[in-house]
């Protein structure tokens, strides 16, 4: 799923249905969640923060991967 998101262009349409399964952090990517689906991401973000791989500011969320920052 994440790889497909990286190829979307402005005005592309994304339709999601029957999304299920385990959620685990596998590296840099895009997090999309709503409602109760946000809960696993809170755990992932807390873990990244504890490892000093997460930087939160008022305007962005950055994950530190391989010595560089990824803006979210």
Image (tube, grey):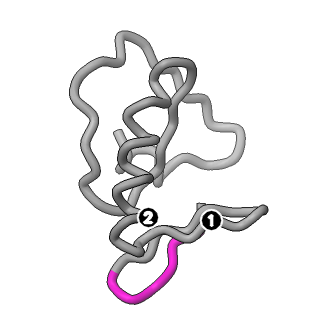
> Where does label 2 land, which residue?
49
Which stretch did the figure color magenta? 66-71
Secondary element type, mark 2: helix
Residue depicted at 55% across the width and 68% down the height:
62
Residue depicted at 61% across the width and 62% down the height:
61
Q: Position of residue 33 (x, y in %)?
A: 51, 30
Was residue 10 drawn as part of the magenta stretch in this picture? no
Q: Position of residue 51 (x, y in %)?
A: 33, 70
Q: Position of residue 48 (x, y in %)?
A: 38, 62
Secondary element type, mark 1: strand
Disc number placed over residue 56 in the picture, else none: 1
Q: Position of residue 9 (x, y in %)?
A: 61, 49
Q: Residues within 10 Å of mark 2 (few under 14, many from 20)?
A: some
Q: Overall secondary structure of the magenta stretch? A: strand
Q: Are marks 1 and 2 in contact (CB under 8 Å)?
A: yes
Counting every numbered tag in the picture gives 2
Q: Marks 1 and 2, Cα distance to the nearest angstrom?
A: 9 Å
User: Farthest residue in the bottom direction?
Assistant: 67
């Amino acid at each position: 799923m994440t790889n497909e998101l990286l190829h979307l262009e402005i005005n592309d349409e994304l339709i999601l249905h029957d999304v299920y399964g385990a959620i685990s952090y596998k590296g840099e990517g895009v997090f999309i969640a709503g409602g109760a689906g946000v809960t696993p991401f809170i755990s992932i973000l807390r873990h990244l923060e504890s490892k000093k791989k997460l930087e939160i500011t008022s305007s962005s969320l950055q994950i530190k991967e391989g010595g560089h920052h990824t803006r979210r």
